[in-house]
Each structure stands twice: as structure tokens, then as C-alpha cells.
Image (cartoon, rainbow, N blue to C red):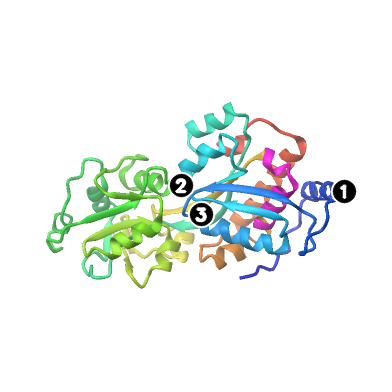
Amino acid sequence: MRLVKSSVTISVVALTILSLAACGGGASDSSGSSLTGQVAIDGSSTVFPLTALAAEDFQVENSGVQVKVGSSGTGGGFEKFCRGETDANDASRPIKDEEAAACEAAGIAYAPLTVAVDAITVVVNKENTWATCLTIDQLAAIWGPSSTVASWNEVDPAFPAEPIKLFGPGTDSGTFDYFTGAVNGEEGASRTDFTPSEDDNVIVQGVSGSKGGLGYFGFTYFEENADSLNAVQIDSGAGCVTPSAATAQDGTYTPLARPLYVYPSVTALAKPEVAAFFQFYVDNDASIAEGAQYIPLNEAQRQQLVADFESLLAQAGAGTSSPSAASQ
């Protein structure tokens, strides 16, 4: 897809940054843009397709800028970000206290930009015709740190005596942190005898290849693999709810709906190519989300995104060097 820019007004700070870059005398590339340089982003595998699409379309208009997007997981990405190795981190959960402390020690200022909404989706094999809806208590019985559940009939006597084979994100994943917090009451609290991977495709292959398979990941990955997996409805006390864009936005898909973030560095935003990329990302956020099959922000969330980005640009223009309170 190729994106049409929205009517969002580019902030005065961004214009100033880009104007200064233009005065530097850089030669225009074939796209008509004088920008050159690199933008480095890592982090969440859930947010990866969203940022990768933004990068692809930005580079069409700015072929002199190379945007590199990695997917080492939210936690792995924050390690790199707080060492100053990347300009921004994709995250499927808020930054943790220890990560914030590492950034502060390195003098790296930041704040989160909410770029989309997600519904963590619990998936089963296509041959699984029994687990169409699971309660949060049942998920906790399966995934809890002291769980010894090994067969589906241990979850519900009406289910068959089919062995359960579990697949899930690795411990560096923000999805792992969010899911364990929502289901087990504590981030990172999980049984360990499952097949972990930071690559969601490995989870897809594992669940689709095992009749008793069970896993979880972001809604987009389910949509891409709906022909080989079934999504499980979730009952958090008000009845069974199907994961979808509508239920994630209206608040009925609880507690597994969540915001998705990108954390840019204030220092990085002082670079024209980084400021331009994130301006493009913010201006085209709805189209990027839809193009990547994510759940777009609602109007209030969209207005907050614009305000948050303008605040970050203002900090970049003022040369702020201490971590932003907005990140806490």
C-alpha cells in the first residue's frame, strides 16, 4: 500500500528541524527529498509489522533515509534502546521501572507514543472443536506458574482427554508480560514447560501442528493465520467475547485488549531524518494501522498521539536531556 498523508498540521518544531536540514545543502534524491541518514528501531514483534510498514512507505518518499526495524522483543529492544543503540523502541507494554532506570543512567530521554490497539488472541488448533470459549480462571489454571495441567479434560471434564501442548512468546516479549499479568496476576508469572519463541510464526506452526495445541499472540498474527487456527472467545465474567477490532476498542474484550507503543528518544528526534520519519508515522497512523491490519486509534486516542508527539518534538528542539515524566 502507499499512504496518503492526513491533514494533521506539522508542528512548528518539526518544520524548524527540517528547514535547518534543508539549509545544510544536502542534494535531493530521486524522491525529491533532501533527507539522508539512518533510523534504527527495535523491540516488540507485535508492533514490528506496523513500524515496518511505516518505514517502507516513508522510504518511498525519502529514499535517502534507511529505516532499519528489528524485532528482538519488547524487553530485548529496551536493552538496546537504553544503551543508546537504537533511536526508538517498539513496545507492546509500558516500560518497566528497571528499564527506565537504565535509560536514566544513560541519559536517554523518551516518552511513549500510542500507535494502535491490540487484542491478545488465544488460539487453538483447527481440530479443536471444544475450547471455543475459556474463562480467565481456566487460562490461569493452564498457564499459572504452579500448573500441572497436561490434558484438556483437566481444564473442563466435558473436554476430551487430549494432551495440551503449549506455545507462547518468550520472556523478552511484551506480550508475555502483558498476558501473564492479565491472566496470572503478575507479570512474568507463568509455567515454564511450554515452547517459547520471540517469533510468532513459530507459535503459529506449533499450534497448527498439534491437535491439542494452545498459544497466544497479537490479533494481527491471528488474522494472518485464521485459515489454520481458531481464536478462542474469552469470558472475564460477562460472557464469551470474541477478539476483534470492535471489542478491543469498546472495552468488552477484557482483560486482553491493550495499547501498542513506540518509544522514540528525544535525542534521536533532534536528527532531521528521525523527526521526519516519526512525523510521517503520526500523520499517517490510521492508514498505517489499517494497511498492516491493526486496530486503529479512536479519535480521542489519535488526538493524544498528536499532542504527545508535539511534546516530544518540543523537548528535542529545547535539547532536553533528562527522561520525560510522561514516560512513567
Q: Horizontal and vertical percent for residue 34?
A: 80, 55
Q: Position of residue 55 (x, y in %)?
A: 62, 58
Q: Earlier in the sequence, mark 1 or mark 2?
A: 1
Q: Tell me which secondary structure the magenta stretch mostly adopts.
A: helix
Q: Secondary structure at mark 3?
A: loop
Q: Quadrant of residue 189?
A: top left
Is 134 located above or below residue 313 in the figure? below
Residue type marked 1: Cys
Identify the residue under disc 3.
Answer: 47
Asked whether, in this view, residue 90 is left or right of residue 65, the answer is left
Where does the image place residue 323, in percent across and percent down from the top left?
62, 33
- Give the spatial CA distance, label 3 vs label 2: 9 Å
Q: In the rendered image, which quarter contains the N terminus?
A: bottom right
The quadrant in which the C terminus is found is top right
Q: Which residues are magenta?
A: 267-281
Which residue bears the numbered disc 2? Answer: 73
The residue lying toward the viewer, choosing from 157 and 217, is 217
Packing grade of label 3 (10 A; few <14, some 14-19, many >=20) is: many
Residue at disc 1, secondary structure: helix
Residue 129 magenta-highlighted? no
Q: Residue at x 45, y 60 (%)?
A: 248
Instruction: Mark 1 or mark 3: name the one nearer the start of the chain.
Output: 1
Q: Residues within 10 Å of mark 1 (few under 14, many from 20)?
A: few
Closer to us: mark 1 or mark 3? Answer: 1
Residue 239 in sight:
no
Mark identifier at residue 23: 1
Q: Secondary structure at mark 2?
A: loop
Q: Nearer the viewer, residue 145 or 74?
A: 74
